[in-house]
Amino acid sequence: MSAEKAKRTKGAVAAAAPSRDDARSAMADRAILESISDGVFTVDRDFRITYLNRSAEDIIQVRREDAMGRMCCEVFRSNLCEGACALRQTLEQGRPIIDLSCFIVNNAGQRVPVSISTAVLRDASGTVIGGAETFRNLSDIEQLREEISATRKIGDFGSHSPSMRTIFSQLTAIAETCSTVLIRGETGSGKELLARTIHANGPRRDGPFVAINCGAFPETLLESELFGYKKGAFTGADRDKPGRFALAEGGTLLLDEIGEISPAMQVRLLRVLQERSYEPLGAVKSVRSNARIIAATHRRLEDLVASGAFRQDLFYRINVVQLALPPLRERREDIPFLVEQFIRRFNLVMKRQVAGVSRSALRMLSDCPWPGNIRQLENCIERSMVFCRGNMIEVDDLPDEVRTSGNAVGSPALPAASMQEAVSLSERQAIQAALAQCGGNRRLAAEKLGLHPTTFYRKLKRLGLRVDLPDGRHKRD
Ligand SMILES: Nc1ncnc2c1ncn2[C@@H]1O[C@H](COP(=O)(O)OP(=O)(O)OP(=O)(O)O)[C@@H](O)[C@H]1O
């Protein structure tokens, strides 16, 4: 350090203590600076550090003795150091800067978000001897902000789960195109809502959104439902009837449960997707279609293709963009968020003022396997609100299947009072886990457990277990 610089550096300190009173006051200032949680440092006019408080040491992870006398940009490594140094601006213009957000890189190489303020330092005669900078560590606030913004929401379609991040990151881009989309997910996992969200955020948002559950119609009926018919096409066709393709003109057509359609329908559908035209039953002319197609299924179409049940060429046609919705049991972090959303919705519908769910009720909801996914959770909240008398949903308000299902998914088993009870408890857990894995399908669950369906049904009955049907209703055997 040059003699002149050393003099100036010393001057910053010496100028603060010319008399005993001033010395006392300077010590008090120092004590305050050492006790606050904001980082503080001062520099001389050459931007060499003349003072650094304890919080600054902690935030930058540098020892005071290692920092003193060094250029502040070497120690702080802020994104402002190159070209937009706040201290330099303050020293040049004589004006303080308040609460400027930036980041510094600490000694461990980590980026620390901070808010900085600067001021000019003068000696007793008013001569500028350097500058002071305070900086507040914003890491906690940033983390909170990240946690809050981890809840992504587009319209009604929301999630808090990292496993849904890819879907949200692609959603807007997908919505803007007209590419065919294939949505895969278990029953009730939100396939239709996702399809509606894609439609509502794309250029066809003002056009119709039409959905058809292909699995719900026998082949001949599905054909006329999809393509419509002309008057006289068959006995009873006393007028033209537009099909779903026609109804979805200029909008979006959701072909739900596409994996269920027959080979003959697969051929017809392939033609529409390839040629963008179709013939209604009894029509002599083709009709052009410009509906955007979204297909949905709870099955892995790749497996159906491998087994020959689904045409490979049709699979390629619809699998342009694939979105896989994870089941609710694989995104349990969404449960509190969804519960809150449903309570808000049912409060409006039922004119209630339920504030939330109790801690133990939420724990139970979080432990449930939810074979019927979000639809089942939605129904469960609706029913709980009907029974809830206070302003919080309590464990007793929850449906039986939620109260008895926790053990199936890893919560510690309750101690059984007798051998018989222990056996029943294990059976109950195994059955509930199998049902959860098979999306509530009892035949598959029985197969999975190596039980004859009749034995399985008998056990369901004996244990008083209810099974969630795909439409969210419940069946007790
Ligand atoms: N992310 C979400 N946020 C809020 N509500 C949701 C979400 N996903 C689904 N839901 C709600 O859950 C219910 C079931 O969703 P949806 O009908 O879209 O499921 P699905 O997978 O199409 O079911 P299915 O296979 O039985 O046709 C709907 O009431 C829907 O509004």
Image (tube, rainbow, N blue to C red):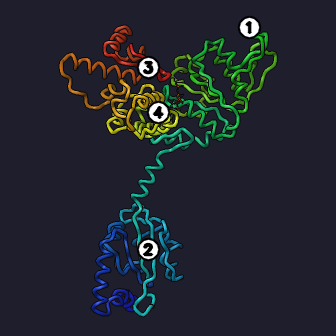
Badge 3 crowding class, 10 Å Cα cut-off, few under 14, some 14 to 19, many 20 or more, is some
- Image location (x, y in percent) of residue 18: 32, 93
Q: Is residue 376 visible?
A: yes
**Residue that label 3 marks:** 474
Q: Secondary structure at mark 3?
A: strand
The numbered mark, 3 or 4, whose residue comes first in the sequence reads 4
Q: Secondary structure at mark 1?
A: loop
Above or below for 347 versus 436: below
**Residue that label 1 marks:** 236
Mark 2–mark 1 distance (CA, rounded to whole Å): 85 Å
Amino acid of disc 3:
His
Q: Are marks 2 and 1 in contact (CB under 8 Å)?
A: no
- Say which of 335 and 6 sits in front: 335
**Residue that label 2 marks:** 73
The numbered mark, 4 or 2, whose residue comes first in the sequence reads 2
Q: Is residue 113 left or right of residue 14?
A: right
Between marks 1 and 4 in the image, the one whose residue lies nearer the viewer = 1
